[in-house]
Amino acid sequence: MNTDFLARLLDAAGPSGFETPAARVWREEAATFADRVDVDVSGNSFAGIAVDGGPRVMLAGHIDEIGLQVTHVDDDGFLYVAEIGGWDPQVVVGQRVRILSKEGDVTGVVGKKPIHLIEADERSKATKIRELWVDVGAGSRDEVTELGVRVGDPMVIDVPMVRLAGDRIASRAIDNRIGAYVVLEALRRIRQGPECAASVWAVATSQEEIGYAGGGARASAYALEPDVAIVVDVTFSTDAPTIEKKAHGDHRLGGGPVLSRGAAAHPVVCERLIEVAESEGISYTLNATGKATFTDADGIHVVRRGVPTGLISVPNRYMHSPNEVVSIADLESAADLIAAFIRSLGPDTDFTPR
């Protein structure tokens, strides 16, 4: 695995709607081996190989992450914020942030009233985002303006990727920068391996965390007109304390990719993924998604006349926190599975349920 690229990608800032820095890192890496690299007006990045082949395969992983956004600057120079995506405000308390201003990155810290000054009956109550602020060290609104910070500027928690024991890593942007990473690594495997019949496009999609109508995934699928799509995202790793396996399945770090059944996950594509995983000796688990997947698959599978779509997920601990944790082995297995799946396709492959 290209861990240097992985670290660069995870450390680049790219909250939903402001993905450009992370997307640029992805495209720069893609340009080292892909036949064609492009970006559209929605911020989706594309990398294709064998672009005239068939069938046409779309691999989608969203490049955005959750973040915060400036909503107000008061007279004393304190910044008030709103969420970009779904935060547990308790994990925001006391963090350092990186504000993406027009003049460059600005460092700030998340402030909250000290525990000594909080009334006893309030101490057990959960903190809300509106009760927090960001301190950049400025003494006035004018000083904030001089730093280039404006209302609407996004920010991310300022923590780099770290290596943990074994092959595990922690990062604030696992969800779902690793999906964008896996689809590009799968494309690299196709490029470096035996020729295949398919035309393959990896897409780093935009705005998944806030894309209630399908985000950038729907727009990119409309443009590509794929015959089949594979979405890579994260799912809950249920090997951590207090997680209910009866509700969320038995998915462990290092246990391999998770294959979804139901909702947007096409049954023919899912069965083919299972067959390929077993023939390749790739460990996997199954996940039931009876209503919705809450991933890019929900937007892609209904585009045009419908796109047969598979969903591969990577087990992730501590989702939507500054320290999400995954196993690199699971990323490798997911990329291997996708590459083997693509090589199994031919011009006459039929995904029609019969």
Image (cartoon, grey):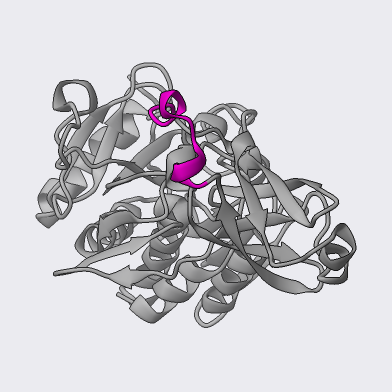
Q: Position of residue 190 (x, y in %)?
A: 37, 68
- The one nearer the camera, 23 or 133, is 133
**Position of 148 compared to 97: left or right?**
right
Of the 4 image quadrants, the one containing the C terminus is top left
Asked if residue 340 can be seen in this view, the reply is no
Q: Residue at x 57, y 42 (%)?
A: 208
> Which residue occupies 32% across, 27% down?
267
Q: Is residue 293 magenta?
A: no
User: Eyeballing the image, is 45 above or below 266?
Assistant: below
Q: Horizontal and vertical percent for residue 272?
A: 26, 39
Front residue of 349 and 112: 112
Residue 13 located left or right of residue 309: right
Q: Position of residue 156 (x, y in %)?
A: 57, 58
Pick the residue in front: 6 or 92: 92
Instruction: Check the picture and name the quadrant holding the N terminus.
Output: bottom left
- Give the answer, above or below, for where 327 lies relative to 189: above
* The one of 348 and 186 positioned closer to us in this rendering: 186
Q: Residue sitting at 27 percent across and 47 percent down? A: 317
Image quarter of residue 319? top left
Q: Which residues are magenta?
A: 114-125
Q: Residue at x 43, y 26 (%)?
A: 125
Residue 100's quadrant in the figure? Answer: bottom right
Count of numbered circles in the view: 0
Work out whether residue 182 can be spotted.
yes
Displayed quadrant of residue 211: top right
Q: Is residue 302 above or below residue 272?
A: above
Q: Residue 4 location, x and y as percent?
A: 39, 81
Q: Does the stretch in magenta take in 115?
A: yes
